[in-house]
Image (cartoon, helix red, strand yellow):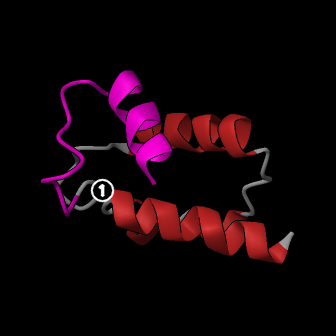
Amino acid sequence: MDELKKLLTENFPTIDFDKEKHLASDDILDSLCIIQVISLLKEKYSINFPIEFMCSKNFESIDAIWDTVNRIKQTE
């Protein structure tokens, strides 16, 4: 997860991923940012991001994002 935090912090330096627990619902990550996160995750972890995983609850926190990456890896 440290690797994920580094990746996100490098690309979104104004967001405190340790502190924020409502990234999507508080519009800290808007829809365009979420698309950017998906692109970063696809590239970094060599995963395909199925449409059913593209919902805001999967982007609420760094923990939720990490859990989503791991669930996707398990389905591939």
Q: Which residue is mark 1?
A: 24
- As drawn, which residue projects farthest toward the front? 2
- Residue 60, given in percent of the width and then of the height, sits at 32, 63
Report the number of discs.
Answer: 1
The residue depicted at 12 percent of the width and 53 percent of the height is 19
Q: Residues within 10 Å of mark 1 (few under 14, many from 20)?
A: many
- Residue 34, given in percent of the width and then of the height, sits at 46, 44
Question: Magenta residues?
Answer: 1-22
Q: Is residue 25 above or below residue 40?
A: below
Judge whether residue 12 can be spotted in this image: yes
Q: Amino acid at mark 1?
A: Ala
Quadrant (top left, top right, bottom left, bottom right) of the C terminus: bottom right
Q: Is residue 69 above or below residue 13?
A: below
Which quadrant of the figure has residue 52? bottom right
Nearest the eye: 65 or 51: 65
Q: Is residue 71 left or right of residue 7?
A: right
- Residue 14, given in percent of the width and then of the height, sits at 18, 26
Nearest the eye: 61 or 52: 61
Nearest the eye: 71 or 52: 71
| Element class at badge 1 | loop
Which quadrant of the figure has residue 10? top left
Nearest the eye: 23 or 71: 71
- Residue 17, given in percent of the width and then of the height, sits at 24, 47
- Based on the picture, tell me whether residue 16 belongs to the magenta stretch: yes
Q: Is residue 49 above or below residue 56?
A: above
Q: Is residue 54 above or below residue 32?
A: below
